[in-house]
Amino acid sequence: MSRSFSTVVIKMSVAALLIFSISSYAQWFESTGHAQIQNNDVAMAKSAAIKDAITQALVFSGAKVSSVQTLVDGVLTQDQVKISSHGEIQQIEMISEDTKGEVFAITLRLDIFSEPEQCVQSQFNKFIAVTQSQLNNREQARMGQIFDINKSFSKQLYNTLNNLDMTAKPIAYFNSAIKVDKYFSQQFDYSNPLLEEIANRTNAQYVLFAQVTSVATSDKLNNDYAFWQDESYQRHFAIEFTLFNGDNYDQIWQNRYQTHGLWPFDKTDIIDVNSPKFWQSPYGQAIGDLTHTISYDIQEAMACMPTTGKILHLENDKIIINLGKAHGLKKGQMLSIAHHNYMTDVAGNKMPHKITTLNTLKVEQLYQHSAIAISPNNTPLAGIQINDIVEIISPEL
């Protein structure tokens, strides 16, 4: 997936506000988008700010956004956004626009017809461990000595996910290098224990792996005879992702992305990939813009996945679980219980096997990432063990 919008840093600011409701589904939303002005290009910044504002309104209304729309002067001109028809814009009105320093801001009022959400699981949060991506072709990182671009990108993606108001909540696990090649192979000979270890350490149900496949530079852009010009290059960035369920080791999503941007630095410069100098460059901005696309795709992939946890402790009639307010639980929430078992295949690999029981739990006390549950009506719970799976019972739509 290639992004052409590579010269603007988008600063997301979730300010969508429900104004009033015309009918059961048609609603007016007001949102403010921001974008940084680069090279005095106000028109480009305005397009990015409009894109920002529309995205916020769609996400707030319940639309599933898998990339970001570009609307120029009120006219949709580029199909850079994919919205799965859970939200349709009926009308857009510009309320105001303003420039403060190097930031362009625009406030829009949008009439959005949102279909009722068909996925009950989307009301609950899921936590995802964002691991350190792997840099596959290190020799390509020599120009600029950007050998830590993989770790820096993982941090940027974590920050983007963390700043967006979505049900996919990130947990940082990018300080340690992880060899992820096998998780991208078609033989599925990856390490289940590593998935389980990361999920347990982070208390996340899902684990995200990534590998940076290219940071190659193209030919020099300026003329060799124009010796007074600085050297400039186009530089590529390509990355692959795969997302696993840490409880049952299922691969639930996989995708690859690519973009490019101007590399404005001298060939001999050593660039700190964690510095504003890098991330504010056209190349850094292109990568930063890509993190928004990836974040929305991850959100869409996880929206209808179940929110599950496990039993941490048993004491008399009290059961402590690793789900809490952060996951969307409320007092009185009902939970189902399943035993966590394993089956061994012909190759000797242990595969998780869930055995559903008739037992249920009711949340009695809530904490941020844990809860105390009891048996409803004091019904005895037979055979319940630590590490048994608990899953939120959602009311049908």
Image (spheres, helix red, strand yellow):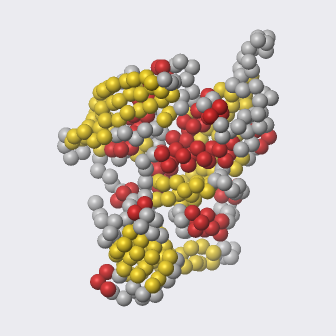
Left/right of residue 81 with respect to residue 263 in the rendered view: left
Quarter of the image for residue 253 reads: bottom right
Where is the N terminus found, in terms of image quarters? top right
Q: Is residue 242 above or below residue 203?
A: above
Q: Is residue 311 above or below residue 59?
A: below
Give residue 213's position: percent from left, percent from top: 69, 43
Evaluate whether residue 378 shows in this view.
yes
Give residue 217's position: percent from left, percent from top: 73, 31
Nearest the viewer among 36 and 20 is 36
Nearest the viewer among 312 and 249 is 312
Give residue 119's position: percent from left, percent from top: 36, 57
Quarter of the image for residue 206 reads: bottom right
Give the residue at x 78% y 27%: 267
Q: Residue furthest left?
A: 23
Give the residue at x 51% y 41%: 292
Nearest the viewer among 42 and 206 is 42
